[in-house]
Image: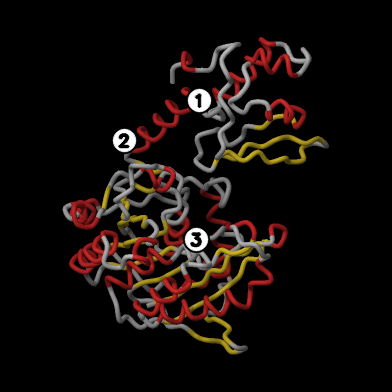
Amino acid sequence: MSEELLFNSLDRPVPPLRSDVQTIPIPHNGNTVLYFYDTMGYAPSDFSLAAAVEPLLSLINGSFSINKIVGLTEGRVDAQDLLDFVRLLDQNRLLDSNYFRSASADIEEQFEKASLRKPALAGSAYPAVKSELQVHLERLFSEPPMNGEVVNGEMNSAEPPERALYAPHIDPEVGSDVYVRAFSSLKHLTPERVVILATAHYAGYYPGIYDDRPFIGSAKTYELPHGSIETDREYLERLKTSADQTGFTLNDRAHRIEHSIELHLLFARHIWKHDFRIVPILIQSFDEVMYLPEGERGRQLSHFAEHLRKLDDPDTFYLISGDLSHVGRKFGDQEAASSMRSRVEAFDDQFLTAAASGERENLFELIRQNHDRYRVCGFPPLYTFLTAFGGLKGNRMDYSWWDESERESAVSFGAISW
């Protein structure tokens, strides 16, 4: 990246800090530092500053030049030192600047050209070192929880899946019991191909690229600390031939930092020791389908489901990656999740029952009538699967609730086998 694009003026307004980067105060060696969390992963993951610079950061808002900021601080800050500081922020891709736009475009283009998709969560959500990860996973799976869900005080046993598994993609530490119970049930299977239908959380960060592309595949090899997994490129190419009808694309930058597929592969790679290929597909929101079932997005869904059916064979297994409800103040509700819990759990119960019974229409009506009130992120991939393979009778395997009480929010999640 050319250093010539870095901000370098005393008189022009300094570009503002990026609005999509969170500044989080963290205790460190008796002091407080400001940690910069970049959802999109453009900024370095280890960049932090002393908390004392916070008043200065508030002036880097796109309105003031270096000279103006020096004046506002009554000369307590030297102009050249401030410019050097601003250039440091710019170099670390924290400013909404020309340098950042060029650097982020380069990152995306390099990702798309690469043949390998490196893990985005290794070292944060799970150990990045192979030996440490193996010990961690072996410990989790050494005593798998009882295979069943407690419903009204009784254990609801579930048959092991033969065709598909719906499981969460929540943080592994939060959902470890559900992950272990769900993926332990796959040990008897040895599929040659695994089609993964997963929630697309980040496609909306790329305006214009995915506007009419609800199904986002990737042909990259998925790298994990305990083993890489090849994609089934022939299958993907056959899906690509239907792109005009389905909106399927292999423009895969939405996969770069996505966790919904990576976390399923983390556990599948541990359970399955045999060679298998994957078909990783991210699926965008179906909001349009709720209001216009016969509209363009609905037609794309029908055509895509038809192609999944045509490509199906006995050697293919389906993983559907999605959590359930997202409620509370963190997600925009006006009340705490704790006060909503009974309502949300009643809705989740209906949702899981309809999905396990293969009742596609009932599942759709639940979401439509509710206007997706509880933000069920797993609905698009699950609805896609049931559209392709309606009528399958499955079993509810698990249900859990993550109460993030300090933020008055919660996420529910569960598992279904077919």
Q: Which residue is mark 1?
A: 97
CA separation in Å, label 2 and label 1: 24 Å
Query: Where residue 81 sits: x, y (%)?
Result: 68, 13
Query: Where residue 159 sits: x, y (%)?
Result: 42, 83
CA separation in Å, label 2 and label 3: 27 Å
Q: Is residue 12 left or right of 73 when viewed as pictured?
A: left
| Dot 3: element | loop
Image point (68%, 41%), residue name? 24
| Residue toward you, 181 or 289 | 289
Q: Which residue is mark 3?
A: 169
Query: What type is the residue that disc 1 sits on?
Result: Ser
Query: What type is the residue that disc 2 sits on?
Result: Lys
**Residue sitting at the far right:** 30
In the figure, residue 36 lies in which quadrant? top right
Q: Nearer the viewer, mark 2 or mark 1?
A: 1
Q: In the figure, 81 relative to 203: above or below? A: above
Image point (27%, 62%), residue name? 295
In the figure, residue 342 lies in which quadrant? bottom right
| Residue toward you, 292 or 210 | 292
Q: Which residue is mark 2?
A: 113
| Dot 1: element | loop
Q: In the figure, 217 relative to 387: above or below? A: above
Image point (61%, 62%), residue name? 333
